[in-house]
Amino acid sequence: FKNDLLEPLHDGAIFSLNGVKLAFSTDSYVVNPIFFPGGDIGELAVNGTVNDLSMCGARPLYLSAAFIIEEGFPMQDLWRIVVSMQEAARKAEVALVTGDTKVVDRGKGDKIFINTSGVGIIEKPVDIHPCRAAIGDKILINGPIASHGIAILSVREGLEFETVMESDTAPLNGLVLKMMEASPQIHVLRDPTRGGLASALNEIAKQANIGITLKESTIPIQESAKGACEILGLDPLYVANEGKLLAFVPPEEAQKVLDAMKAHPYGVESAIIGEVVADHRGTVILNTRIGGSRVVDMISGEQLPRIC
């Protein structure tokens, strides 16, 4: 499959057609369970592709949806999922314009799988790409990490916590638009989904051949999620998110972008969590609360399979 559009390993392919700059992305959703606190597989499928397009600096326009359904899947559950997708598309201001449905024999699938693909237009004068991370860039995140993964795990394993953990699934295109309006100098956008914050940052560090330093005390996480991770033996840096983004921004632009993020409903708890450095290229280092430091490696295997 090697080609110039695939080579960058971005969240989507970016190309020009008759002078119009477009982004195209696709993703498949196999989350288990299909209904969980804060969302469902349908909402996730819409938001996920909307967000992948947004990470390219595009305004999402049109989506396709394809369903692979196991024989015997309850119609009321399918209806609930489709209605959820309709509402998610409305919130994200995108249109579901084409689709497909296939049914597989009972026992040959697991309830329902969904694929969504999307196309968006890049209207702003931006050049957002993982390789553009530059020495001195500040790293911003739009809110608390690990909520989605813990929400999925709590239902899957029948765990009960004092506070009900809800997925953070959300369409981030409106937030990204406000960020780009605040500064067209954003270098990188990435949504830290499967593999969490740590995996996303490691990928960027290696692609751009830069070092990353994080400050643990500035990384937002809800106390309930933090406590759940401690009980379960999980590192929240590796737990999946579905409504979070990372932004690499030149230091002189960081405060403007941060202010724009905090003014948006999906960015109220935004924070600057680290910076790009010339040292330890290809590696992420975490400065801990107690004054030490440790390497944050790429995850080996998957902490939580079928998380999205």
Image (cartoon, grey):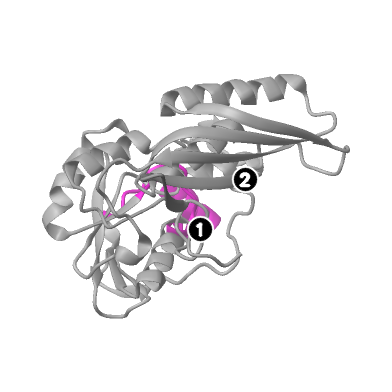
Can you give x and y, in whole percent of width and height, for residue 34 in the image?
Answer: 65, 35
**Which residues are drawn in magenta?**
218-245
Near-viewer residue (50 or 238)? 50
Disc ID at residue 24: none
Q: Which residue is mark 1?
A: 195
Near-viewer residue (32 or 293)? 32
Asked if residue 23 can be seen in this view, the reply is: yes
With respect to residue 103, does 76 lie above or below?
Answer: above
Q: Which residue is mark 2?
A: 28
Query: Can residue 233 be found in the magenta stretch?
Result: yes
Can you give x and y, in whole percent of width and height, for residue 146 in the image?
Answer: 45, 49
Q: Quadrant of the N terminus?
A: bottom right
Q: In the picture provided, is 256 more to the left or to the right than 283?
A: left
Can you give x and y, in whole percent of width and height, for residue 29 in the image?
Answer: 62, 43
Asked if residue 261 can be seen in this view, the reply is: no
User: What SS does tag 1 mark?
Assistant: loop
Mark earlier in primary sequence (1, 2):
2
